[in-house]
Image: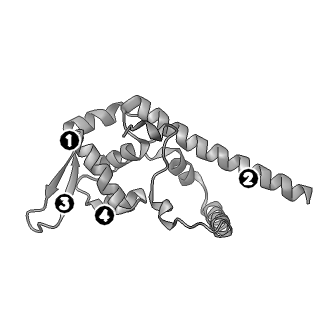
Amino acid sequence: MEVRQDRMQNITKQLRVLFRTIQSHSKTVERQCGLSSAKLWMMWELFTNPGLKVSELAKALTIHPSTCSNMLDQLEDKGLLRRDRSKTDQRAVHLFLTDEGTKLLAMAPRPAQGTLSKALEQLSDSHLTHLEDGLNKLITAMQVKDEEAAMTPIPSLNADSGKS
């Protein structure tokens, strides 16, 4: 029983380290470029894939399309991106960085997609499968009520400060 208790405590500590590391990276990004790490990742996606639609960008970032749209509004207000309506299909809107957005990216910290995504890329398929299975079981055991939580970026340590 003691081994199980030790393992549970170690997992709790590891989850804290993981969460704090993500928050710390986000805070560093905010301090260096004035944007959340999620918005910076969004801009990198647009830099590498100019002309994406909102739904495509939301899928790439694993966030809800309405969350993506709200974040895009904020970036557009800062003059970092523009939306171009398709000439052939007026319903389709394509996203592009402005020159100002490209300049900001040149000075932004890396990895653009955050420390978690970068670390996950380094894991083997077998490790990813085990991690996914274990986390699914943990979430089920926790009886998570907020299914939409998975589609919202993790806030930085100073999320209440109003920084974008």
Q: Which of marks 3 and 4 precedes in the sequence? A: 4
Q: Residue 87: image x %, image y %?
A: 8, 63
**Crowd rating for badge 4 (residues with CA inside 10 Å; few <14, some 14–19, many 20+):** some
From the viewer's perspective, is 16 left or right of 5? left
- Element type at mark 4: helix
**Crowd rating for badge 1 (residues with CA inside 10 Å; few <14, some 14–19, many 20+):** some
Residue at 20% x, 37% y: name it: 99
Does residue 143 appear in this view? yes
Q: Which mark is residue 98?
A: 1
The alpha-carbon separation of the residues under discs 4 and 3 comes to 10 Å
Q: Which of marks 2 and 1 precedes in the sequence? A: 2
Looking at the picture, which amino acid does disc 1 mark?
Answer: Thr
The alpha-carbon separation of the residues under discs 2 and 4 comes to 35 Å
Q: Nearer the viewer, residue 58 or 121?
A: 58
Q: Which of marks 4 and 2 precedes in the sequence? A: 2
Looking at the picture, which amino acid does disc 3 mark?
Answer: Val
- Residue 98, by quadrant, is top left
Which residue is disc 2 drawn over? Answer: 11
In the depicted structure, whether residue 164 falls above or below residue 15? above
- Residue 59, by quadrant, is bottom left
Q: Residue 159: image x %, image y %?
A: 46, 41
Q: Which of marks 3 and 2 precedes in the sequence? A: 2
Residue at 42% x, 34% y: name it: 30
Q: Residue 130: image x %, image y %?
A: 66, 65
From the viewer's perspective, is 73 left or right of 64? left
Looking at the picture, which amino acid does disc 4 mark?
Answer: Ser
Looking at the picture, which amino acid does disc 2 mark?
Answer: Ile
- Element type at mark 2: helix
The alpha-carbon separation of the residues under discs 1 and 3 comes to 15 Å
- Element type at mark 3: strand
Residue at 52% x, 38% y: name it: 157
Which residue is disc 3 drawn over? Answer: 93
